[in-house]
Image (tube, grey):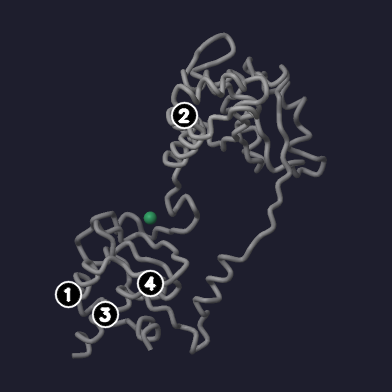
Amino acid sequence: MVIRFRCLALAAACLVGLGCAGDDGAPDPADLSELVQAPAPVQVYGSWHCGNDFCTWGTVRDMANFDAMNHWLIDRGNGSPSVNLVVLSFVNPLRLLNHTTDTATLNGVPRGMTAAIVNYFASHGVRVMLSIGGITYVDDWNTALDSDGAQLGRNAAALATQLGVGIEIDYEENTNPRLTALQDFINAYRAARTLSQHGLGAAIDFNVPENQPGSSTRPFGSMDPRIVAIFEAFHFRFGGCFNPRDPMHFEYCETPCAPASANAGTLGRVITPRMLLPLRATDRVLA
Ligand SMILES: [Zn+2]
């Protein structure tokens, strides 16, 4: 009877994501929630970077020369960077849309905007963005948006992924901006660049080899139910309750979250007595 009760209790914990472990001195999930959501001041010290050719970045740079000219950006003299963001300016939107290759452009990207340049900054903790546009390319922005704003957004997203950079929109049309097409650009870019919970820093995987997606050897893969109970008490959704199962996976929810109820029922049925013996953590969570 005890085992059966605990089966139900664990299933209930999985189902409703109970989070009330504060009575006995354990951290209260509400405190953790406040910590995660604590506002942090925005501190950006950025630099627009026009290369050495008036913002065309039309040639591949010699890295020794580039370092000589730019070292102050990555080292202010004490080893720390002078900025935390560098914006490489500018990418021509029409060439990016058409994946143009010419003397100054390779597959739509200025030849000077290379992985080596990005890594020069990124390896010192400086984020890198590419700026699309600038006053010189207003007409090309318009032409590209009139042609296919969504495709331009997808091309920009692919470039951002390829180089590990962000993208800045510098669209300086002030008389007849193509706002609908620009929104198409933004929507397509965001759709292609949606981050996973891991990418957002809100998920963690444990013991990957024994907890592969769809694992059916045990309802939890090899995951100890006490670990599951503790994570759920702190607003983490357990991937073992997903369909298909992802028992290596826990992801944070701002509010207590319930797993898929159908799978929670399965968990209650197939859990084994041996797994249920050390359930004190769950007992406390449910108390
Ligand atoms: Zn995961």
- Label 3 – label 2 distance at C-alpha: 56 Å
Which residue reaches farthest top?
103
Camera-nearest residue between 34 and 115 = 34
N-terminal of the pair, mark 4 or mark 2, is: 2
Picture coordinates of residue 249 (x, y %)? 36, 60
Depth check, mark 4 against mark 2: the one in front is: 2
Q: Secondary structure at mark 1?
A: helix
**Mark closer to the chain start, 3 or 4:** 4
Question: Which residue is identified by label 2?
Answer: 149
Residue type, numbered disc 1: Arg
User: Which one is in front, 23 or 42?
Assistant: 42
Of the two numbered discs 1 and 2 in the rendering, the one whose residue sits closer to the viewer: 2
In the image, residue 148 lies at what x, y percent?
44, 25
Amino acid beneath label 4 = Ile
Instruction: Identify the residue at image location x=57%, y=65%.
Output: 37
Report how far apart the C-alphas of labels 4 and 1 lie in the structure: 19 Å
Instruction: Check mark 3 vs ligand 1: CB closer than 8 Å? yes or no.
Output: no
Kindly identify which residue carries mark 1: 269
Determine which residue is flagged by label 3.
Answer: 276
Q: Where's the C terminus, which quadrant?
A: bottom left
The residue wearing badge 4 is: 227
Q: Nearer the viewer, mark 4 or mark 1?
A: 1
Packing grade of label 2 (10 A; few <14, some 14-19, many >=20) is many
Instruction: Please name the amino acid that badge 3 sits on.
Output: Leu
**Mark 3 and mark 4: span between their CA atoms?**
12 Å
N-terminal of the pair, mark 4 or mark 1, is 4
Q: Find residue 47 and report its horizontal and vertical position in percent.
A: 73, 36
User: Could you tell whether 48 is left or right of 166 in the image?
Assistant: right
- Asked if disc 4 and disc 2 are in contact, CB closer than 8 Å, the reply is no
